[in-house]
């Protein structure tokens, strides 16, 4: 085991089984006697991603919820520290059984631990950083109040430079062939492949570090063909067009690479490479693979392009899919196995089967509900999905709606790792995941939906144009934080962003949204700052703030609404003086005719303001009738200098560091700063 792997193992085991969690059956129980001072417990790291690091610090006490933990970071070897966002306080927030079902029948029944956790983002890949955490509490701190950890971000995955190279050609190739050459991918990847009874006899030829170069052409096998007995055997020329694929047309791959020496399947660079599924169900099954890179491999005409995991059965590790076009599919990548980890999905164009010229709802409009389902659906830790273009799906990018996570160390049932056969070095729950700089267009339900996500889910700088429902939603979020930062939303017909199924830990910072309404749903420990929420619904509540916790806070936002409702603002929370309540009948709901009345009565939004469309350089409200699609260049959502949204925010370290005025601006775009790259970097 390498030094880095050994460190990763030690940290994972310490978090999962360390002394801070020894009383795991009681970690979620409220103390019998209140204790307001705080005891610093076990501190550890979550799995790193390319651009983010996260820490978790278990505590005891602080029952009055006034402890704080500051986070500073710097590249190893640097002298100056940079300030990060303070860690988020988790305080036994509950994710309730949905639909008021008993726990035995419910998919969700989870209580968060007593802890602090949080992320540093926008780091450099493959670099070492120091993270310094400092705990304080007016009632006193027991234990070491300041500690420093060292962590390394993952590098961008690269092919190995010194493995074997195999060449794949389509049937009918007439030019010269580089050797060793094979007809079809399976015959290069495995020692051979046959259509008939012996289809799964042959073992992988590829070994860690090997590269399979796929030359230009369309690889569309005849999966109905049986035998191909006209061939001369392994190494012979194939007379029939089957490519050795089985009856279901599925490429079953199960080779094992390593992070340092992955197995690479890459376009050779002499023209486009297309794998056509001929309308089969599943094209590439990679559930048993480790550290595979697919680069420039285009896919079409299949229900599932990459099956990468099944719940409690198996899942891939270190899967890379990049620089590819995946079109006319039901889903591009799916795994809901909690042991799947460290995927990197980047710079792809992914196109579903929904109509190209109209925004379609999944209920009530003409046609089947699910022409295409979820473009990307993941589960497990350490995934990165960035710089992709996604369009014409039911959902864009999601985390699987899995139910209670199996592998969180605070789960109360014993033996959960062993019963699933999961390796504690690799499994850290559905946490530490990045969705960044994706361009999402024409979605019939949700653009980004980190449903089953655990702690430290980062949804940063994505663009969502034309969504028939809520743009960004978690249902539920397990404890959080789910960081929703600097996303741009236009023509989302429902709510801009929300927590559903009674999740917790949603963090909404510096987003720009032009949608039907602002925020909605119900959850706990929700925080909102520096957003622009522009609504165009003609009726109904515009801003719904519903929370189980009195420490959910919203402020420094800009609002504009078109509703004719007499009460556009709604607030539901525990009664005055109650820290948290998860009994629905104990919550107090109040409605308000305007922002000023809402501010006065609740204390929320004290520094927020009403704004209008004039804050943007050039933008109009979407039309009320459903169906129209708006091009991304039809509006300019950068702020107009001197408008009411400029210098109207509050400083948020690691979020508003580029603010140039007397205060940060509202929304995703700071005046004078160019918009980020959305979609593929080519």
Image (cartoon, rainbow, N blue to C red):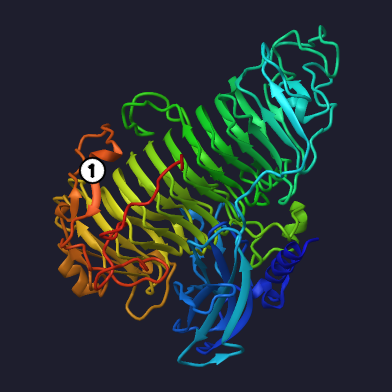
Other residues around mark 1 within 10 Å, as few (<14) / some (14–19) / many (≥20): some
Identify the residue at image location x=78%, y=12%. 237
> Which residue in the structure is indicated by mark 1?
635
Identify the residue at image location x=19%, y=52%. 616
Along the horizontal axis of the image, is 330 left or right of 428? left
Viewer-nearest residue: 181 or 426: 181
The answer to whether residue 45 shows anywhere in this view is no
Q: Quadrant of residue 615?
A: bottom left
* Rendered location of residue 587, percent (x, y): 35, 68
Q: Quadrant of residue 194?
A: top right
* Position above or below: 348 against 317: above
* Rendered location of residue 448, percent (x, y): 44, 47
Along the horizontal axis of the image, is 256 left or right of 28? right
* Position above or below: 87 against 593: below
* Position above or below: 120 against 463: below
* Rendered location of residue 313, percent (x, y): 71, 44
Element on which disc 1 rests: loop
The answer to whether residue 642 shows anywhere in this view is yes
Viewer-nearest residue: 531 or 137: 531
As drawn, the residue found furthest toward the front would be 176
Viewer-nearest residue: 309 or 366: 309
Quadrant placement of the N terminus: bottom right
Viewer-nearest residue: 530 or 259: 259
Identify the residue at image location x=64%, y=62%. 408
């Amino acid at each position: 085991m390498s030094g880095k792997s050994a460190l990763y193992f030690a940290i994972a085991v310490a978090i999962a089984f360390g002394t801070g969690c020894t009383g795991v059956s009681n970690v979620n129980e409220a103390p019998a006697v209140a204790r307001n001072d705080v005891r610093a417990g076990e501190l550890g790291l979550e799995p790193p991603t390319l651009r983010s690091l996260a820490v978790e610090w278990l505590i005891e006490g602080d029952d009055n919820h006034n402890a704080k933990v500051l986070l500073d970071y710097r590249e190893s070897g640097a002298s100056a520290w940079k300030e990060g966002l303070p860690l988020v306080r988790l305080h036994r927030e509950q994710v309730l059984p949905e639909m008021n079902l008993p726990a035995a029948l419910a998919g969700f029944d989870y209580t968060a631990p007593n802890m602090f956790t949080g992320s540093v983002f926008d780091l450099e890949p493959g670099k070492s950083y120091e993270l310094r955490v400092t705990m304080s509490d007016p009632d006193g701190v027991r234990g070491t109040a300041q500690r420093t950890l060292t962590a390394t971000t993952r590098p961008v995955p690269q092919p190995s430079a010194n493995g074997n190279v195999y060449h794949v050609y389509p049937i009918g190739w007439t030019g010269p062939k580089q050797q060793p050459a094979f007809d079809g991918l399976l015959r290069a990847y495995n020692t051979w492949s046959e259509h008939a009874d012996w289809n799964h006899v042959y073992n992988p030829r590829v070994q860690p570090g090997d590269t399979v170069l796929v030359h230009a052409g369309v690889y569309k096998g005849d999966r109905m063909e049986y035998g191909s007995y006209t061939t001369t055997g392994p190494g012979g020329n194939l007379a029939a067009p089957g490519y050795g694929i089985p009856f279901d047309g599925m490429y079953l791959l199960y080779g094992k690479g390593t992070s340092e020496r992955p197995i690479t399947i890459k376009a050779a660079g002499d023209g486009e490479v297309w794998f056509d599924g001929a309308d089969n169900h599943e094209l590439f099954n990679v559930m048993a693979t480790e550290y595979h890179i697919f680069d420039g491999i285009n896919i079409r005409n299949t229900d599932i392009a990459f099956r990468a995991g099944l719940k409690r059965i198996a899942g891939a590790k270190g899967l890379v899919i990049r620089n590819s076009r995946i079109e006319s599919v039901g889903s591009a990548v799916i795994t809901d196995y909690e042991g799947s980890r460290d995927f990197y999905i980047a710079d792809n164009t992914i196109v579903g089967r929904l109509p190209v010229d109209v925004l379609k709802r999944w209920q009530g409009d003409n046609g089947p509900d699910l022409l295409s389902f979820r473009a990307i659906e993941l589960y497990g830790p350490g995934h990165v999905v960035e710089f992709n273009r996604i369009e014409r799906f039911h959902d864009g990018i999601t985390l699987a709606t899995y139910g209670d996570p199996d592998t969180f160390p605070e789960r109360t049932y014993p033996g959960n790792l062993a019963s699933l056969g999961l390796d504690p070095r690799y499994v850290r729950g559905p946490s530490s995941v990045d969705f960044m700089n994706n361009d999402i267009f024409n979605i019939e339900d949700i653009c980004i939906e980190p449903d089953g996500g655990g702690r430290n889910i980062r949804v940063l700088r994505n663009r969502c144009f034309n969504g028939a429902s809520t743009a960004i939603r978690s249902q539920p979020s397990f404890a959080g934080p789910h960081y929703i930062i600097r996303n741009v939303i236009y023509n989302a017909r429902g709510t801009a962003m929300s927590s559903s199924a009674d999740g917790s830990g949603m963090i909404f910072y510096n987003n720009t949204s032009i949608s039907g309404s602002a925020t909605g749903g119900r959850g706990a420990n929700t925080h909102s700052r520096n957003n622009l929420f522009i609504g165009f619904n003609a009726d109904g509540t515009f801003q719904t703030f519903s929370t189980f916790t009195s420490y959910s806070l919203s402020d420094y936002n800009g609002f504009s609404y078109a509703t004719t409702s007499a009460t556009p603002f709604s607030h539901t929370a525990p009664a005055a003086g109650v820290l948290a309540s998860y009994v629905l009948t104990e919550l107090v709901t109040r409605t308000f005719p305007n922002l000023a009345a809402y501010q006065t009565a609740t204390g929320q939004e004290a520094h927020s303001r009403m704004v209008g469309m004039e804050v943007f350089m050039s933008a109009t409200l979407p039309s009320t009738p459903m169906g129209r699609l708006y091009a991304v260049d039809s509006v300019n959502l950068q702020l107009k200098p001197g408008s009411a949204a400029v210098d109207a925010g509050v400083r948020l370290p690691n979020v508003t560091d580029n603010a140039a005025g007397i205060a940060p601006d509202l929304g995703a775009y700071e005046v004078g700063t160019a918009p980020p790259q959305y979609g593929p970097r080519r």
